[in-house]
Image (cartoon, rainbow, N blue to C red):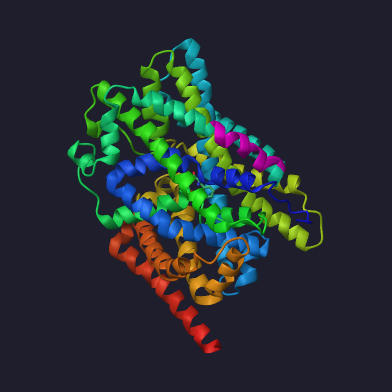
Amino acid sequence: MENNRGSWGSNIGFLMAAVGSAVGLGNIWGFPYKMGKSGGFTFLLVYLLLAIFVGVIIMASELALGRKTGKAPIAAYAEVSKQYKFLGWLAVLAPFFIMTFYSVLGGYCIYYIVINVMGLFNGMPDSSSFGAMITNVPVSIAVLVAFMVICYLIVAGGVSGGIEKFNKVGMPALFFMLVIIIIKAWTLPQASEGLKFMFKPGYAVEGGFISAKPDLISVLGTAGGQMFFSLSLAMGAMITYGSYLDKKENLVKNSVIIVIADTLVALMAGVAVIPAAVANGLAAGKAPADIKLNGPGLLFATLQDVFHDMGAIGGVFGLIFYCLVLIAAISSAISLMEVLTAHFCDKRIAEGKEPQRKKITLYVALAITALGLLVAADGLGSNGFAPFQVFKMEMSGDWNADWLDFMDCWSEGIMMPLGAMLMGVMIGGEIGTKTILDEIHEGAGTGFDKFYKFCVTFLVPIVMAFVFAGQLSGFFANLGSTGSYIIAFGILAIFAIFTYVIKRKKA
Ligand code: PHE
């Protein structure tokens, strides 16, 4: 491409970067614990179906939209649809909010790398290190800043010179380290209990890990939300990465590869993390229900106990494990930052100016860090100024429980499902599936067309409305499930009717 936006060096380089974006904390931490919370096997089944029928479709759509326009999300949406230009805004704001807490979690990984290395010499830390870290504000801030400096350096290096380069080394390294951790986990006594929990239908309840099976609708909400987050969808990332891709590349094939790789790593993380946590908990004499497989505690408290109980050698496995989580976090964080950086660079290019990537990346990093400071200092609500305390109100669902959840609520809870749901309406109802399919045909055959048309027009909006409702009822307990359904399907109905009616009138 003869412009100053940048482009990928090769398709494999793009794939590594896209898989790097997809593989993140969502896979290594979110997937295992959500699977645990939502009844093991049922969750897995629903997740896989959603990944095939919705994940691949939105992935291909986003890559096509990016490549067709050659622009970052806001300009990309604006170019294809006046009515839906605001989706571009959602796709730029969401990554910003995600980054304000993703960077804090990334910082925690750096902290855990340090304490495991120190543990090799001074005795291994256990799960109490987690409480100690989140209530230590200066340390939480220091590791957040360290994480942001690393991300800044990579993104400032450019699309192929920074992002692609990091992922080409980082992804294979991550895979290799994950295999080591799986082997170690499976050789722990009673690791098979953890595997049964994951793969044996009904065992999560039968084995006493959770008290009741969640209903199918809430599984759908959790699995759908997880699938989108994990695949980096509806966050502008794949539109932006697609905008650097060559026309001759096959978008369908690439989408399928990204989805398979991401799901594979999530499963691999699951079969490493869950059996290790379960085996270790049982060995320590805990009842299944008391093994904490939920929340950030899984990654940083429950697993640190596993490394602690291995004795001095645990420091080596702790080091390997937190290094791989750090790589996963960085490779995703740089894609979130790139959405913002690309937006401002494109704006300057459109005004006929030099993009000044380094300077823009610095501003982006500073803005994220500024808000990240709040999340870091809040320490998951443990330091006395969680949103419900600041706003002097009752705690009502996750939205005001702590600042991490607050940021997550706007991005993952609202913007993401709304953006994906309305993307379906926009493609199926306004711009037409042909707009996207023509772009896909640049590098692929027509075999995908029928499946695509059906899924994007009907399946995606409806499934996403369920996911949206599920997210709303989790974040806003006061709405209840009926209220959440009314809002989600109400918004869908309004947009669908307007879009189709306006189109009819024009025709
Ligand atoms: N997919 C990443 C994860 O699983 C998170 C992410 C979401 C990254 C959206 C980019 C865009 O952790």
The image shows residue 382 at horizontal and vertical percentages of 42, 36
Q: Which residues are the magenta region?
A: 161-173
**Considering only vertical position in the picture, is 335 above or below 1?**
above
Magenta stretch: dominant secondary structure:
helix
**Considering only vertical position in the picture, is 295 above or below 503?**
above
Q: Is residue 167 magenta?
A: yes
- Image quadrant holding the N terminus, namely bottom right
Residue at position x 74%, y 44% from top?
Answer: 358
Residue 187 seen in the figure: yes
The image shows residue 424 at horizontal and vertical percentages of 48, 68
**Considering only vertical position in the picture, is 433 above or below 478?**
below
Residue at position x 65%, y 43% from top?
Answer: 365
- Image quadrant holding the C terminus, namely bottom right
Q: Nearer the viewer, residue 409 or 233?
A: 233
Task: Report which quarter residue 63 is drawn in.
Answer: bottom right
Residue at position x 42%, y 30% from top?
Answer: 300
Residue at position x 33%, y 47% from top?
Answer: 44
